[in-house]
Image: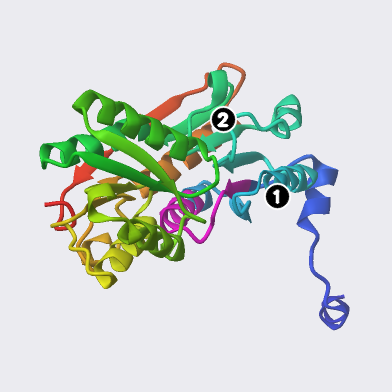
Amino acid sequence: MLAAIDELGYVRNDAARALRLGESRAVGLIVSEASSPFFADVVQAAGGALAQGGYASLLGNSVQDIGVEKSLIELFESQRVRGLLIAPMSQQQPALVSLAARGVPVVYLDVPSPQSLYCSVAVDDSLGAQLAVRHLAAQGRTHIAVVRGPARLPQIEERARGAREAAADAGVRFEEITASGYFVPAGLEAGAVIASRKPSNRPDAVLAVNDLLAMGTISALIDRGVDVPGDIAVVGYDDISVAAVARVPLTTIRQPAREIGARAAALLIAEIEGDETHSHEATVFAPELVIRASSV
């Protein structure tokens, strides 16, 4: 029997077994960009917590495409996952409705759940941007630009909103610059655009919505003779591991990626293994301003 199994290369079909027995130890995990250092830390922490609880995590990368996100949700539903962790492109994703109708627990990652329909773990992104803008204004900066990518991600919208409100409160000029993406090359593009302006029309401070954009922006500015932070101060967001050793050590807004992932996994396990008395919980972490050489 065992020899025949080896010869045929048989692999047990756990998905079919789960369908037959009505059980599964697999959990879906969908993020908007798996190559992001922030989400890499979230995924690692969530996967570790799930594994300790006896669950396997199946990772899906929506690549900031709401159609891909919908397909991944439907795929995981067809695989009869026990639950889903998701950092959604939109807080209103219709494909999640059928999961909820089947009683599959869902936990939102990095954004609040709409109308408390699901558990969620997030950071106060509006507050994080406000901390950054207040810091820049306190340094005497009078024209602040938010550098962002094109995708209308909920957390990015909150960061832009918080920055706009804080700039208005501080009485400083505000603008948004939309780059082609959310990684270093897009930051290089944004920095080149800023450096190409006349000095009188340049912002004297930049808040990039993540650290990779910030580091790309800094490199482009320096390469074009713009001093950072003398001419333009730059602040990032996330506090990824390389922020402290960037070309100019990066002032940034720290959000606890590993704590977010671990907490979300714990909430999902509790809901999977709980009973009808479970009530949805919204965990919101406070961001922290980390000051380094790029802004002072």
**Residue nearest the viewer, comparing 44 with 192:** 192
Q: Secondary structure at mark 1?
A: helix
Q: Is residue 22 left or right of residue 33?
A: right
Q: Characterize the local packing of mark 2: few (<14), some (14-19) or many (20 or more) Cα atoms within 10 angstroms.
A: many
Q: Is residue 277 above or below residue 155?
A: above
Residue 226 spot, x, y in % from top left: 22, 64
**Residue 107 in view here:** yes
Q: Residue 14, located in which quarter of the rendered image?
A: bottom right
The amino acid type of the residue labelled 2 equals: Glu
Q: Amino acid at mark 1?
A: Val
- The structure residue drawn at horizontal position 60% and vertical position 22%, both measured from the top left corner, is 275
| Residue at x-position 50% and y-position 35% | 154
Looking at the image, is mark 2 or mark 1 earlier in the sequence?
1
Locate the N terminus and report the quarter of the image it occupies: bottom right
Q: Which residue is mark 1?
A: 68
Q: Is residue 283 magenta?
A: no
- Residue 207: x and y, percent? 30, 46
User: Compared with residue 223, is residue 207 higher up or lower down, i.e. above or below?
Assistant: above
| Real-space Cα separation, disc 2 to disc 1, in angstroms | 26 Å
Queried whether the magenta region covers residue 44, the answer comes back as yes
- Quick check: 187 left or right of 83? left
> Picture coordinates of residue 287 (x, y %)?
28, 38
Pick the residue in front: 93 or 294.
294
Residue 2 at x, y percent in the picture: 82, 77
Q: Quadrant of residue 273?
A: top right
What stretch of residues is rendered in magenta?
28-48
Could you say whether the residue bearing mark 2 is in a helix, strand or loop? Answer: helix
Q: Which residue is mark 2?
A: 271
